Image (spheres, coloured by chain):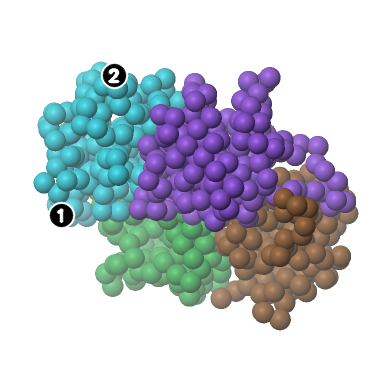
Chain colours: A brown, B purple, C cyan, D green
C-alpha cells in the first residue's frame, strides 16, 4: 500500500510556513508518499505545490466544491462535508505533518491522535493537560522540514 | 429557536468529572436548553442523565450504531460517521461546555472555535500558541458547573 | 429504546402529499415514535407539524445551518454535511416512511434498503431491475397514511 | 481542472459487468480522466484495474479503513463515513458511469441526479415515477462501454 501523508496547516500562514510546507511536500513526494491536504490555500497549497514539483501526487480533500481547489492538485475530492472533512483527511493518512497552527489545524491534530495516528509538528500550537503538563501522547516536535519528514517516515516505518 | 448546548468530554472520566457533567446537564435543562452529547459513556452519559433528571431533552449524536447509546437519551442519532460526528455535534450547538480532556474532546473544542462557537471549559486541556502564549480566542475557563452554565448562557445571549 | 421513524419526501410537494405527511407524523407521534426528517420544507415540515400537533418529538437532520430549520422541530441537527446527511437520517431510523418522490428522497430509500432498514412508500417513485421487473426487497407500498404507519410499525415489531 | 469520473456499481457483480467496468475504466483513463470509485470489490475493483492498465489514476473513496481497498488504487481515501461516503464520491465527479445495479449504486445515481450531475447507465436499475412513467431527468442509458464513455465525455463537454 502506498504511503499516504497528510500535511495540515492554516489557510492564512506566514512566508516561512509556506516555504516549510513546500519543502515538506517535496520531500514527502521524493520519498514516494502521496501528499494529502485539505486542498485550500496557504500551507495546503504550498505542500501540494512541493509534491507536484517532485513529480508526486497531491490530493486535496476539500470542505466544499472543487472550485475552491488549489491549482497543484492531482485529484480534488469535493466532500461538501464542511469541517467534518478534517476527519476524512486524517483518517486517510498513515502519519500527519503539521506546519503552523489554527483551530482547524488543531482539530486535525486531535482527530489524528484520537485514532492513534502519529503527528509531527513544525511550529504548531501546543496542547497541555488541565495542570499545564505535557501529554504523554503529544505530537512529535520537529525543528526543520527535513527533520519533520524524517520523523514522519520513521514513525510510519516503526523506526 | 430552542437553545441547544453540547456537553463534551471523555468516555473515560473521573468521578468528579462525572458529577460535574451531571450538574451541567441538569442546570442546562432547567434553563430550557436541549442537551446534545456524543451519546456515549462517561461525561456524555452523565450530562444526559442530568438533563433527563430535570425533565429536559438529551440528544446523542453517536459515531456508530444506536446500540452504543447511553440509556438517558431522548433521541439517538446513529450517524455511522465515526469521529466526523464530532463536527456534526458542535455545528448543532449554540455553545459548547467541556468537562475534562481527551483528544476527541479537544477536536470538538477546536471544531467549535473554528466555527466561532463559544466554548466554556471545566477542567479541560489547555491550548497555547507555538511560543507558549495563551490564544486570544481561547475557550472560557469556569471553576464550577454553576459558573460554566452561567458563562455558557451569557455567551449565547451576548450577556 | 424509543422507536425512531424517518419520514422522507420532497421539499416541493403537492397539497395531497403535505396532508398525508402531516397525518403520518401525527399518527407516528401518537404511537410514541420520535419523528425524524430532513428538517426542511414540504413533506419534512408537514411531518414535523403533525408530530408536534400530537405532542411528540420532531427531530430535523439538516444539510446545513439551523436557520433552514422548519418551525416545528423540537431539535435541529445542523450537520453541514450537505446531502451526506441523508445517510445519517436513515441510519438513525428503525423504519422509513416515504411520501412522494424526488432524487433526494430516492437516495434515502436506497440508503435505507442498503442497510436492510424497512421502507414504506406512499405514492413515491418506483424502482425496477435492468429487465423492468420488481425487486425482491423493494419498499412496501401503502395506499393511505393510516396503512403506511400501520405497515411501518408492523415492520419494526416484526409483525 | 482534470476530469474526474466516478464509476459506480455493486461489489457483487456478474462477469459481464466486471468486464464492462474494466473497459470503462480503461477508456476513461485513456481519455485523461481520473477514475473515482467506492474503492471496494466487484465493479469498483474492475474499473480501478482498467484505469491502472491504461496508466491512469484510480482513486478509491472507501466507507471504512484502507485495509478494504482494492489493489489497483493510486490513492485510497479511508473516509470512515459508512454509506455517507457515497455522497462524497459522486460530489467529486464531473459525471457518473454506472455498471449494474444495487441499492448502494442506486443511492449514488440518486445523489448525483440530486446535484444535477450527469449519469450514464450500463445495464443498471430503472427508476419510474409513481405512475410508472419515465422521469424527465433520468440517467442516460448506454448499450456498450464505448457508448457509455462517449456519452459521459459528451455530457461533461456539453457535447
Total number of numbered discs in the rendering:
2
Q: What is the number of the mark on residue C53?
A: 2
> At 11% from the left edge and 46% from the top edge, which residue is drawn?
C159
Q: Residue at x 16, y 34 (%)?
A: C148
Image position, residue A58 (x, y; %): 67, 61
Tell me, yes or no, if residue D32 can be seen here: no
Q: Chain of mark 2?
A: C
The quadrant where residue A12 appears: top right
Q: Is residue A151 visible?
A: yes
Same chain, labels 2 and 1: yes
The percent position of residue B77, horizontal first and vertical second, equals 40, 43
Tag nearer the camera, 2 or 1? 2
Q: Is residue B81 above or below residue C104?
A: below
Q: Between disc 2 and disc 1, whose residue precedes?
A: 2
Q: Do the CB atoms of the residues marked 2 and 1 lie less than 8 Å apart?
A: no
The answer to whether residue C21 is above or below residue B9 is above
The subunit carrying tag 1 is C
Q: Is residue C1 above or below residue D28?
A: above
Side of B148 relative to B38 (left or right): right
Q: SS class of the residue under badge 1?
A: loop
Viewer-proximal residue, D55 or A50?
A50
Q: Which residue is mark 1?
A: C136
Question: Could you say where residue C26 lies in the image, as x and y percent from the top left?
Answer: 24, 24
At 37% from the left and 37% from the top, the residue drawn is B74
Cα separation, mark 2 vs mark 1, equals: 37 Å
| Crowd tier of the residue under label 1, counting other residues whose Cα lies within 10 Å: few below 14, some 14–19, many 20 or above | few
Residue at screen point 41% across, 66% down: D40
| Residue D2, image quadrant | bottom right
Q: Identify the secondary structure beneath mark 2.
A: helix
**Which residue is more in the foreground, A143 or B159?**
B159
Amino acid at each position: 500500500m502506498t504511503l499516504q501523508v497528510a500535511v495540515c496547516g492554516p489557510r492564512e500562514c506566514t512566508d516561512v510556513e509556506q516555504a516549510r510546507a513546500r519543502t515538506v511536500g517535496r520531500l514527502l513526494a521524493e520519498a514516494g508518499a502521496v501528499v494529502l491536504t485539505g486542498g485550500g490555500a496557504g500551507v495546503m497549497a504550498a505542500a501540494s505545490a512541493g509534491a507536484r514539483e517532485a513529480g508526486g501526487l497531491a490530493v486535496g480533500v476539500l470542505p466544499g466544491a472543487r472550485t475552491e481547489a488549489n491549482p497543484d492538485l492531482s485529484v480534488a475530492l469535493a466532500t461538501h462535508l464542511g469541517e467534518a472533512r478534517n476527519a476524512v483527511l486524517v483518517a486517510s493518512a498513515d502519519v500527519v505533518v503539521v506546519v503552523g497552527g489554527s483551530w482547524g489545524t488543531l482539530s486535525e491534530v486531535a482527530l489524528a491522535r484520537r485514532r492513534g495516528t502519529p503527528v509531527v509538528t513544525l511550529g504548531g500550537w501546543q496542547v497541555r493537560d488541565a495542570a499545564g503538563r505535557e501529554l504523554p501522547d503529544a505530537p512529535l516536535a520537529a525543528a526543520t522540514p527535513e527533520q519533520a519528514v524524517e520523523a514522519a517516515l520513521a514513525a510510519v516505518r516503526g523506526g
